[in-house]
Amino acid sequence: MTRLKPLDTGLMTDRQKQVYDAIVSGPRGQVRGPLAVWLHRPELASKAQELGQYCRYDSALPPRLSELAILTTARIWDAAFEWQAHVPHALAGGITPAVIASLESDETPQFDKTDEAVVYAFARELNMTRAVSDETFDRTIACLGADATVDLVGVLGYYALISMTIKAFDLPGLHDGSE
């Protein structure tokens, strides 16, 4: 059970309803999970959903690598809601079921693609040690380029915020009665 109840759309302020409508009319199509929590503070919800839209749909990372970074972060944080929401996107983006199973078991996957190994190593290192070594940074820049590396950090930061919200407000997973 979430610690903060979702807002009743009939009781929203004008600004909350405006942000709600903007989210629903965008690529997400609905307000759930962390966005429902953030809607209590409509300016946070507005800015966060804009950042999320960029990170998810408009970054220099291909969806395959973005979804790998998201799942890696969700697993580190044990954020079931985000994990369950993104497994289908990761599969559709080209992440193999074997990689997803390894991530779910908190084991290092065996990657067939160098860029996936690089994204995973960077995501794990930054999330776990709160830093990135020169070796990992140089390898990431060489593999992805500067633009995609900057966007990778943005994706990791945004999904850390998502994961913190899930954990702080005790949001259940998608398959735990939250839908």
Image (cartoon, helix red, strand yellow):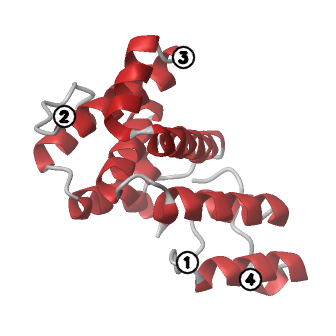
Q: CA distance from mark 3 to mark 1?
A: 35 Å
Task: Tell me the kind of residue under disc 2.
Answer: Ser
Q: CA distance from mark 4 to mark 2?
A: 40 Å
**Contact, mark 4 vs mark 2 (Cβ under 8 Å):** no
Under circle 3, the secondary element is: loop
Which of pointers 2 and 1 lies earlier in the amino acid sequence? Answer: 1
Which of pointers 2 and 3 lies earlier in the amino acid sequence? Answer: 2
Residue 137: percent from left, percent from top: 44, 22
Q: CA distance from mark 1 to mark 4?
A: 12 Å
Q: Is residue 13 visible?
A: no
Q: CA distance from mark 4 to mark 3?
A: 41 Å
Task: Tell me the kind of residue under disc 3.
Answer: Ala
Q: Which residue is mark 2?
A: 102
Residue 164 vs residue 135, the one in the foreground: 135
Q: Is residue 177 left or right of residue 171?
A: left
Residue 116 vs residue 44, the one in the foreground: 116
- For marks 2 and 3, give the one nearer the viewer: 3
Picture disc at residue 30:
1
Instruction: Please say if 20 is above or below 92.
Output: below
Determine the residue positioned at 19% across, 34% down.
102
Picture disc at residue 131:
3
Q: Is residue 112 left or right of residue 57?
A: left
Picture disc at residue 9:
4
Residue 55 vs residue 30, the one in the foreground: 55
Badge 3: how crowded within 10 Å, few (<14), some, or many (20+)? few
Residue 154: percent from left, percent from top: 57, 44
Under circle 4, the secondary element is: helix
Q: Quadrant of residue 24?
A: bottom right
Badge 1: how crowded within 10 Å, few (<14), some, or many (20+)? some
